[in-house]
Image (tube, rainbow, N blue to C red):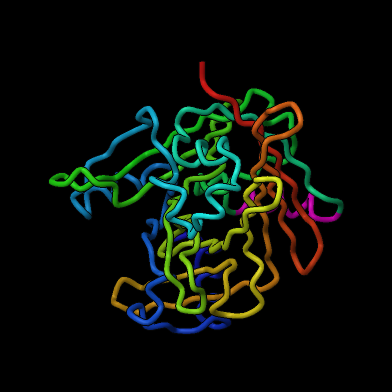
């Protein structure tokens, strides 16, 4: 295991808390191996849980139904139908992405890439829009039970076409946090012996857009978590209260589906990502 991974895991253990996975099941999820994330964890997870792999089938979505993230009947009427279609049929879309690192945080992006992202092939956040000028390769991968054919895990696997680097290799699911009345969206990014998880609540805005937020203030809230396991039944979790993010998915004035993804650290904006989603021809 690389020294930087050992340091990160020690930080989680010493500054986070040891948790009982039965009590905090909403934080638990698949983890990565110690060498490479990329799509390796997908095959390992399928083998471990005896699941069948289905790649990028037509009409394959991040969610089976938008109601999975707690959309009420009233909200279902209000939410833009294109936003719903995107989440339920994500594989039918092509993507363009633009990125903007803010001021002093730009060197941090390069450092993250150098120390972790390039090596693990996970979270290769684009440093500039030139990197993503050729767009993204996007795959929706379902891991399904072999008897019922129902999806247990849904992975959104995205690669920067120009560099072949993995920008995101994440599992999209939901969780039931006892602090919240309705289910929350949970995105798991496997890391060596653990994961980074973003837990988000939703709001359907007046214009029909969908706003997803991870802006909690303390452990147990929605937000950004590192989780770690030693493979012997011991689990730790670290709530990163300084990290907040928002994703707004909407239809613009020209009827184009777009998403703004904004990330803050200690209240300061450090990265803006903008997506344009177009139906495949």
Position of residue 252 in the picture relative to residue 93 (left or right): right
Outermost residue, right side: 103
Taking the spot 54% from the left edge, 81% from the top edge, the residue there is 16
Q: Is residue 132 left or right of residue 11?
A: right
Residue 166: in sight, yes or no? yes
Where does the magenta region start and end?
Answer: 104-115
Task: Answer with the quarter of the image where residue 104 lies.
Answer: bottom right
Looking at the image, the residue that sits furthest to the left is: 147
List x then y, in percent, for residue 113: 64, 48
Q: Is residue 113 magenta?
A: yes
Instruction: Assess whether residue 105 is covered by the magenta stretch.
Output: yes
Count the marks: how many? 0
In the image, residue 92 lies at what x, y percent?
47, 27
Is 254 above or below relative to 217? above
Q: Is residue 27 above or below residue 248?
A: below
Which residue sits at x=62%, y=80%? 218
Q: Where is residue 216 in the image (x, y as percent from the top left)?
A: 64, 72
> Where residue 272 appears, x then y in whole percent?
75, 47
In the foreground, 249 or 25: 249
Tell me which residue sits at (50%, 84%) in the image. Answer: 17
Residue 186 in view here: no
Residue 173 drawn above or below residue 169: below
Of residues 57 and 251, the one drawn nearer to the viewer in this rendering: 251
In the picture, residue 29 is in which quadrant? bottom left
Q: Is residue 250 left or right of residue 32?
A: right
The residue depicted at 36 percent of the width and 44 percent of the height is 40
Q: Which quarter of the image is occupied by the N terminus?
A: bottom left
Main SS of the magenta segment?
helix
Q: In which quarter of the image is residue 258?
A: top right
Which sits in the foreground, 179 or 272?
A: 179
């Amino acid at each position: 295991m690389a020294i930087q991974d050992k340091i990160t895991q020690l930080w989680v253990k010493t500054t986070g808390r040891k948790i009982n996975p039965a009590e905090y099941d909403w934080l638990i999820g698949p983890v990565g191996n110690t060498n490479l994330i990329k799509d390796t964890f997908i095959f390992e997870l399928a083998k471990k849980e005896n699941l069948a792999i289905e790649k990028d089938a037509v009409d394959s979505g991040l969610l089976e139904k938008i109601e999975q993230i707690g959309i009420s009947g009233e909200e279902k009427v209000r939410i833009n139908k294109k936003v719903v279609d995107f989440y339920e049929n994500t594989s039918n879309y092509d993507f363009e992405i633009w990125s903007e690192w803010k001021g002093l945080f730009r060197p941090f992006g390069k450092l993250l890439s150098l120390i972790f992202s390039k090596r693990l092939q996970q979270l290769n956040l684009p440093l500039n829009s030139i990197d993503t000028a050729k767009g993204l390769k996007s795959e929706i991968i379902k891991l399904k039970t072999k008897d019922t054919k129902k999806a247990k895990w849904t992975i959104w696997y995205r690669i920067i076409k120009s560099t072949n680097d993995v920008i995101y290799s994440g599992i999209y699911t939901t969780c039931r946090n006892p602090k919240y009345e309705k289910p929350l969206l949970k995105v798991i990014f496997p890391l060596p012996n653990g994961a980074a998880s973003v837990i988000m609540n939703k709001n359907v805005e007046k214009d029909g857009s969908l706003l997803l937020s991870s802006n909690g203030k303390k452990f147990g809230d929605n937000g950004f978590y590192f989780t770690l396991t030693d493979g012997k039944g011991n689990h730790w979790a670290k709530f990163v209260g300084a990290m907040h993010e928002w994703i707004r998915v909407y239809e613009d004035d020209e009827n184009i589906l777009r998403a703004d993804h904004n990330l803050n650290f200690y209240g300061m904006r450090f990265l803006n990502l903008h997506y344009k989603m177009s139906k495949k021809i």
